[in-house]
Structures are given as C-alpha cells and as structure tokens.
Amino acid sequence: MSQVSSPPPALGLLAKLCFRRGDLDLDVELAVKPGETLALVGPNGAGKSTMLELLAGLTPTDAGAIRLGETLLDDPEENVFVPTDHRAVGAVFHDHLLFNHLSARDNVAFGLRCRGVRRANARRQADHLLATFGLASLATRRPSELSGGQAQRVALARALATKPALLLLDEPLSALDVETRREVRRLLGDQLAAFAGPAIVVTHDPTDAMLLADRIAVVEHGRITQIGTIDEIRRHPATRYAATLVGTNLLDGVADGTTVELNRGHLLTVADGSQLGSVRLTIRPEAISLHPQRPVGSQRNVWQTTVDVVESMGDTTRVTLGEPIALAVDVTTAAAVALSIAPGNSVWAAVKATEVSIQAT
Amino acid sequence: MTANGAPHRTRRRPATRPPASIVVLGALGAAIVVIPLLGLLSRTPWGSLLDRLRDDTVLDALRISLITSVAAAALATVFGVPLAWLLARTRFPGRRLLRAIVTLPMVLPPVVGGAALLFALGRRSPIGRFLDEEFGIVLPFSITGVIIANTFVALPFLVVTVEGAIAALDGRHESAAATLGASRLTVFRRVVIPMIRPSLVAGGVLAWARAFGEFGATITFAGNLPGRTQTLPLAVFTELDADRDTAIAISLLMVAVSIAVLVALRERWWPTDMDSGAPRDGVAQ
C-alpha cells in the first residue's frame, strides 16, 4: 500500500458549488475531512456527477468556492480558477475511460509521465501499483483485453498513481456485474480506508454508499437534502427519497397526543405524546412484526393487511404491505417461509408505539 | 478471464437470396467502375509497355507526382489536424463559416482553385511579389507550386475526415486525461491523436489520393512543364494528343501505384477487426 497511502496530503475539502444549466440548478455546500469518504446519493439528474465535474475543474462554477486545504481552486468572485490538469485530483469513472492505445502499465504511468516523471521510473511505479492491486500479470494488456473488473481496477490504480490530494469516484462500480462488483468494492474500500485525503463517491446503490463511505449526502434537485451517517439517515430520514434509500418507512400525519392520524385516515399510536399538528413518522422495517393471526401482546398498533411485494435479500426478506398503510417490513427469510408470506396473502402487522419515532414538520 | 473474450464469429447462411432489383443496380454500379478499367486494359500495348514507361518524360512525371502528392498529404496532415481539432473542440466566432470555406475546395472546380492560387500567390500579387523580392521564390510554374496546388485541393479531405473523428470522440477520455495532469496540448498529442489514428490514416490516404490525381489546379497554377511541374495526370493529358499508347501506359502506371498504396496501407494500418481497434504491432513500443 505504500505507493498509495504515502505521503499523506491530509488536506480537507471545503466547497460551495453553485451551477445552473438547463434543468439543473445546483446549490450545495460540502465539507469533507482528510481521510473521510463522502457518498453522494440521489436520483438521476440531481446534480451528483456535475458536483464531481465542478470539483475536478472540468467545468467552472457559476458561484461559490472550492478550497482544498489552503489552496483556493475555484472562486468566480476572486477570479480564481485552477484548471483540471493543475489540480491534485484523481478520478475514476463508471466506464473506466482507460486509453485503449496504451497498455495497462502505460495507462497507470500516464499521469506520472504528465507530471514529468521519466518513462522508466513511471513504468516501474506503475508496475508496483499494479502488483499491489493483484494485476501484475496484466501489465502489458490493452484495456480491450481486460474484463470489466480488471479494467476498473487498472483505472483505480491510474487515478491513485499520481498521489492525488482529492479522490473523485463517479459510479465506480455501476458497470460491473454482481460478483465482480463485490471484489472491486472490497479493493476500493481498502484503498479508500488507506487514502489520506478527502474522497467523494457518487453512487445510487445504498450498499456501496454504506460500505464505502463514512457519511452520506442525499442530493435531490440540486440540493443536499440530508447529510449524515447511514444510522443518522436511517433514524431520521429527511425526505422520502432518503427513507426509501435506507429502507426506512416514512409516514406523514397529524398528531393529537399519542395518536397520529395518517393522511389516509388510519390511526397509529406513538409513545411520545408531545407533538401536536403535522408530524412525520419513521418506522424501521425490522421494527414491524408480521403474524398469521391477530397477535396478543403489548403492541399498541395492530392491523390486518395484505402482502403486496416480497423480495428476498438473502437472510432477510423485504415484504411490502398494501392497504391501509404501505410499509416496508424486514423479516427473516425463515420467518417469511414459516408465515407463508406471498403476494396477495392476508397477514397481521404489529408495531410497538416506542418503535414509531415522531418529528414535527 | 471468462466469457467476455473474443466474440464467436459464426458465419450464417443468409436465409433468402438478396432482392433481384438490388443485385441488378449494384452490379451496374460496379460496372461503372470496372468497364473503363477494362477498356484501359484492352488497349494496353503490353509488348512495349516497359519501354514506354522507361521514357525520361514518364519517369520525371512519376517522380514529380510521388514527391508532390506525398508532400501535399504531409502538409495537409501537419496543418489539417490542428485545424480539424480547432473546428471540433473550440468555439470561436466565424467557426462555422471557416469550416464551410475550408471544405470549399472539395466542391470547387479545381481550375477555379488554380486560378485563385495564381491571383493570390502569383508574381503580381502582394504575397508573390514579397516572396520574389525578399527570397527570390517564385511559386507559379515550380514544383513548390505543384505542392501548394495539391495541398489546396487535398486539405479538406483530411480536415473533414479528422474533424468528424474528433467530434465523435467521447470527450470524457480527454477529461480523464486532464484529471491525470495532462495539459490540453498533451491531451491532443497523447490521447486525441492515438484515438483517431484510423481516421487520421484514412484522411491522409484520401488527401494523398486526391493530390496524386490532381489536374486542374496544378495545370492552372503550376503549368505543364515536363521535368519541372508535369505530374502523371498532366503527362497523360499531353500524351493523349501526342502518343496514345504512352498515355495508356502512364494511366496503367497510376492505377498500379494507387492499388499498391491502398493495399499496403490496408494491411498495415486499417483495422480489419473493429473489436481490436488499432493494430497492436506498432508504434507504441
């Protein structure tokens, strides 16, 4: 790892990015500490990739400022714009973008050559890096002779070869199949953990975000609607998109003491009776239990419903309930089998009042 | 690795025969090219062919044709590739107009181009007078004049081909190179040029072919002086009046040179397999 992790640049990123083009109206602020990885998640067209382009200097901002450590990279008001090739930025793209006229080794050496390293030396460093990535035997191959996973690993090596101070990853795993994705994700996770500078990874896969990033920023319509750890977002998702992303149920209603009337008239009981008026409820999918008959016990919220969708996720099964409250429920796959959960079947759902968290809106 | 290696090529028999109307029209299209060539071959004086080609006038014309056409293709490449890049990758006022003007020699009658060159660079023009008085260079009726006339008509073929290739490039490779610290000049030299190499070669060959066959602009601007400005096409034109069999022999020589160049380039440079991209035996090492 020595090639990649040293010397530590250890500069934080501070950015305010304003940018308007067509339908996109981007206005976001970011602070990423050295060694920290921030995931940008959000629907297509939200502005995630544009944020990377602005940070990389491929496009100048309309307003705002980008600061990497002490260095001002972009500030229209100060009339400062450092072009991409003068920024210490490493980038990985979803479709690797390797140069097909160069071998894997020369692709990795490319950045070093651009920065004035002699050919023999650059190739030696490239070989070393490829070896660390388990790609030594592929050094002389052309990108077209590499599998998707191999190519993406070479692309990562290429981005890290110049020892960038800031690492930008644009959907680095999205073009890979499930198996390869897992392997490359592990390598990427190791490299990000060893990386001393700030890193930003754009993804729309919550698994990638959770496994690779320290914090997640939810980007919607050109704004960061929420930023925090996965636990923070799961506990209090700020928007419906964030809730869906982390799998948490989000319900809007009107509170009156410990009773909340949902928009569709159904009543839920909550433990915290301090709210009055419009509220937002969040219920974790694993907090809801399913039963073949009306359960007897302490749960305050019990209702009969039908199963809408059943998705197996390995050990757990995600069950989406239909009327009267559309909710995502996670049960163990064993339990799902025992309850013979299937779309259209009738079940009883139950959730304790203490499991329903409430926030004023 | 596994399944994503070379795709299997299975030669499948077409389910039906091609439609007769298309076959007939296609065959006529081929005949338009083949019949004149057969006419040439049928009139060829095979017995005296070598003697006729060994004639000094013919050898001079061959030499001048090869020198001027290769020089013109080289000049068109040296100046045309940067011009194509500017047209494809930068925005400046008058860009579209410039593109239209640069492609004009493709449609302009070559004799008009020759006349234009004469007015612009002839001894009585400001530029011509300057070159003559300061350096003693006279462009019209010189081999340099032939090269200029050839470059004038050949340049657009290269520019159009290369500009199309650059415009079709996914600019994101250039962005990736920039993140690796490549300046725009480095991106141009180390990324754009290698990526468009097949089109660059194709454009160069087109430019060379256009220059090799150039007639109108050359005869107008550089005249038809044997041993100085007489290229093979001009020699054919002269000999058609003087000695028809020699004209045919020279024509055949041009056919042979053209075919030899096309075949050589195809085998060496042009990708025959789209999957493999550029050939790998080459210049990178």
Image: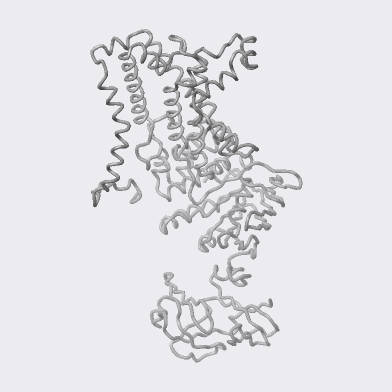
Identify which residue is drawn at 26% across, 19% down: B43
Front-most of residues A280 and B52: B52
* Left or right of residue B120: residue A297: left
- From this viewpoint, which residue is outermost toward the right? A78
User: Which quadrant of the figure has residue A84?
Assistant: top right
Q: How many marks?
A: 0
Where residue B283 appears, as percent x and y from the top left, is 43, 29
State whether residue A191 is above or below residue A237.
Answer: above
Q: Is residue A120 above or below residue B147?
A: below
Tell me if B168 is positioned left or right of B184 in this view: left
Taking the spot 64% from the left edge, 39% from the top edge, the residue there is A86
Q: Position of residue A113 (x, y in %)?
A: 54, 34
Answer whether residue A96 is visible to the viewer in this image. yes
Q: Quadrant of the C terminus of chain A?
A: bottom right
B93 over B259 or under it: above or below:
below
Horizontal and vertical percent position of residue B180: 56, 41
Q: Is residue B152 above or below residue B246?
A: below
Q: Position of residue B32 (x, y in %)?
A: 32, 33
| Residue A123 appears in the figure | no
Query: In which image quadrant can residue A46 be found?
Result: bottom right
At a point 61% along the width and 37% down the height, the residue shown is: B95
How is this picture coloured? one colour
Q: Nearer the viewer, residue A255 or A285?
A: A255
In front of the other: B217 or A140: B217
